[in-house]
Image: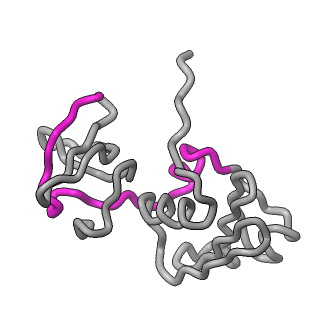
């Protein structure tokens, strides 16, 4: 569950539709309820207790347009980094996803001491870059 006050329009979250867990994007917040558009392009209203965070996996990072970088100058000697423009997520220990540094423009930095979720990354990214973090459109093959 994600507390209602933490949710913002544009957040990517998990919801359950017909007993199937789906990713969806928050479209609207009103009267303590959350409207979410799923990848099937359906809109449903949910109670905040029905909204779950999406763990921030490498696959999720790629879906937001981040690129993996293991160069020690960027990732550190034992780490891994994910880069999107001037924004870097650095895991000093590539095996520990519970500690990361968020870096932007070489000036702003935040240290995170818990595993990030997709919506938390979206909030940090926006706060540090003033740009909304969106998932990239998948190309039709």
Specify the quadrant that holds the C terminus. Answer: top right
Residue at position x 82%, y 77% in the image: 77
Among all residues in the image, which is located at the extreme right? 73
In the image, taking residue 89 as reference, residue 28 lies left or right, namely left
Residue at position x 27%, y 60% in the image: 52
In the image, taking residue 120 as reference, residue 20 lies left or right, namely left
* Viewer-nearest residue: 64 or 34: 34
Coordinates of residue 68 in the picture (x, y in percent): 71, 54
What sort of colour scheme is used for the picture?
one colour
- Residue 90 on the magenta segment: no
Which picture quadrant has residue 65? top right
Number of numbered discs present?
A: 0
* Viewer-nearest residue: 76 or 45: 45
In the image, taking residue 78 as reference, residue 130 lies left or right, namely left
Coordinates of residue 12 in the picture (x, y in percent): 38, 50
Residue at position x 44%, y 65% in the image: 120
Image height of 89 relative to 65, above or below? below
* Viewer-nearest residue: 117 or 108: 108
Which picture quadrant has residue 104? bottom right
Coordinates of residue 131 in the picture (x, y in percent): 58, 52
Image height of 18 relative to 58, above or below? above
Specify the quadrant that holds the N terminus. Answer: bottom left
Among all residues in the image, which is located at the extreme top? 141
Residue at position x 34%, y 44% in the image: 25
Image height of 44 relative to 29, above or below? above
Image height of 59 relative to 39, above or below? below
Q: Which residues are magenta?
A: 41-66
In the image, taking residue 110 as reference, residue 13 lies left or right, namely left
* Viewer-nearest residue: 130 or 33: 130
Coordinates of residue 98 in the picture (x, y in percent): 52, 78
């Amino acid at each position: 569950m994600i507390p209602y006050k933490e949710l913002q329009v544009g957040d990517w979250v998990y919801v359950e539709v017909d007993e199937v867990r789906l990713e969806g994007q928050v479209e609207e917040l009103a009267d303590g309820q959350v409207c979410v558009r799923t990848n099937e392009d359906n809109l449903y209203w949910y109670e905040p207790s029905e909204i779950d965070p999406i763990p921030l996996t490498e696959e999720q990072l790629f879906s937001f347009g981040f690129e993996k970088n293991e160069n020690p100058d960027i990732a550190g000697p034992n780490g891994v980094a994910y880069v999107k423009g001037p924004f870097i997520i650095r895991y000093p220990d590539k095996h520990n996803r519970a500690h990361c540094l968020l870096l932007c423009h070489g000036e702003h930095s935040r240290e995170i001491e818990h595993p990030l979720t997709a919506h938390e990354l979206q909030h940090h990214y926006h706060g540090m870059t003033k740009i909304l973090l969106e998932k990239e459109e998948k190309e039709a093959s």
